[in-house]
Amino acid sequence: DVTVSVTIANKKITAIEVVSASGETPSFFSRAKAIIPKIIEAQNPDVDVVSGATYSSNGIINAVKNALTKASGGTVTETSNGGAASNAAGSTSSDAFQDGTYKDGTYTGFPAARLRASASFPHRATMNRI
């Protein structure tokens, strides 16, 4: 899971720092970090993922969205599919992440915990060939 620290100054994203990246494959994650300057430049986390590092890129993007939701006074809740549903200033569209809507400060963000599913099969089924 990825945890980021997003710094807002003058209502703009000025820095994004990866605080932790437990469970991430270092080679993929180092490539995925290339999206950080793109997010800062766009002032919006809705940027293209890095080809070949999609999961790591999405981890960074979702963590940044989580932090920006907090910075814009919205709430973050966990969804049933393990993602984070953001409600920044009452909107769930990409318009929710526009520069000028953030409160100055440093905000920590992380993707919502992924739900784990498990199944057990105490009795072995037998199939007959026909």
Image (cartoon, rainbow, N blue to C red):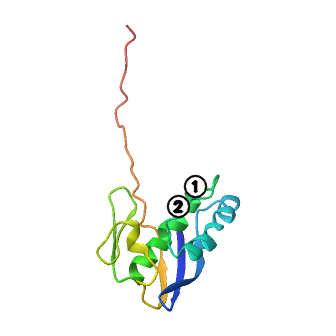
Residue matched to label 2: 58
Q: Residue furthest top?
A: 130
| Local secondary structure at mark 2 | helix
In the displayed structure image, the side of residue 85 where residue 13 appears, left or right: right
In this rendering, the answer to whether 8 lies above or below 65 is below
Q: Amino acid at mark 2?
A: Asn
127 or 109, nearer to the observer: 109
101 or 104, nearer to the observer: 101
In this rendering, the answer to whether 91 lies above or below 57 is below
> Is the C terminus in the top left, top right, bottom left or bottom right quadrant?
top left
| Proximity of marks 2 and 1: CB atoms separated by less than 8 Å | yes
Query: Residue 1: in sight, yes or no?
Result: no
Q: Amino acid at mark 1?
A: Thr
Residue 49 percent location from the top left of the image: 57, 59
Residue matched to label 1: 54
Q: Residue furthest left?
A: 90
